[in-house]
């Protein structure tokens, strides 16, 4: 595993990769943030860093990066669905489950959402409670609110 650290408005973000693709993006408080040793490889993450800089500046609405998250088939289906939630939009856990073909899979969607190792790029922060309330985010609800407010402020139209 190679890694880099990125200073963001949310604090330090840890980027992990396999040399070909991004495998993780973890805020400081993420409960599954891996321990890293050795020297960071900022060159290997130059494109990730550039796109994150643009995102935090409000000029990037989508990411175009090779991703290699480890997870189950169901988790990958959920994570793919998360990437279909538009910048500045939100969807409920039930809506995501329904889009996957099983409106009763709300809890399973919640678990998969919480295990997303590539937050922000795979926008798990855009999933909210059925009433629009902010629920669960591995980076903390303060970070989730910041990300949603940031996107709302920079959303076109």
Image (cartoon, rainbow, N blue to C red):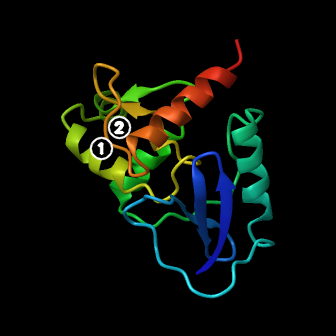
Q: Residue 98 carries which label?
A: none
* Residue displayed at 28% across by 29% down: 94
Query: Residue placed farthest to the bottom in the image?
Result: 38
User: To which residue does mark 2 refer?
Assistant: 100
Question: At which x and y percent is residue 149?
Answer: 55, 27
Based on the displayed image, in which of its 4 quarters is residue 17 positioned? bottom right
Q: Can residue 123 be seen in this view?
A: yes
Q: Is residue 35 above or below residue 72?
A: below
Q: Is residue 25 above or below residue 59?
A: below
Question: At which x and y percent is residue 157?
Answer: 70, 11
* Residue displayed at 74% across by 66% down: 45
Q: Do the residues labelled 2 and 1 touch (CB within 8 Å)?
A: yes
Label 1 environment density (alpha carbons within 10 Å; few <14, some 14–19, many ≥20):
many
Q: How far separated are the C-alphas under marks 2 and 1?
A: 9 Å
Based on the displayed image, in which of its 4 quarters is residue 43 positioned? bottom right
The disc, 2 or 1, on the residue closer to the chain's N-terminal end is 2
Question: At which x and y percent is residue 32?
Answer: 39, 66
Question: At which x and y percent is residue 65?
Answer: 69, 55
Left or right: 116 as drawn, with respect to 95: right
- Which one is in front in this view, the residue at disc 2 or the one at disc 1? 1
Q: Which mark is residue 109?
A: 1
Query: Residue placed farthest to the left in the image?
Result: 104
* Residue displayed at 78% across by 59% down: 47
Q: How many labels does the image show?
A: 2
Closest to the observer: 47 or 41? 41
Label 2 environment density (alpha carbons within 10 Å; few <14, some 14–19, many ≥20):
some
Query: Residue placed farthest to the top in the image?
Result: 157
* SS type, badge 1: helix
Q: In which quarter of the image is the N terminus?
A: bottom right
């Amino acid at each position: 595993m190679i890694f880099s650290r990125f200073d963001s408005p949310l604090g330090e973000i840890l980027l992990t990769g396999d040399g070909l693709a991004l495998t993780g993006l973890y805020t400081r408080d993420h409960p599954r943030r891996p321990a890293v040793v050795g020297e960071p490889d900022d060159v290997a993450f130059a494109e990730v860093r550039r796109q994150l800089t643009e995102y935090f500046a409000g000029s990037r609405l989508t990411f175009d990066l090779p991703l290699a998250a480890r997870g189950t088939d169901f988790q990958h289906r959920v994570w793919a669905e998360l990437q279909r939630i538009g910048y500045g939009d939100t969807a409920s856990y039930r809506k995501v489950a329904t889009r996957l073909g099983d409106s009763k899979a709300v809890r399973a969607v919640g678990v998969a959402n919480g295990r997303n190792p590539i937050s922000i790029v795979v926008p798990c922060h855009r999933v909210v409670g059925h009433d629009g309330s902010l629920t669960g985010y591995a980076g903390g609800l303060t970070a989730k609110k910041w990300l949603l407010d940031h996107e709302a402020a920079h959303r076109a139209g």
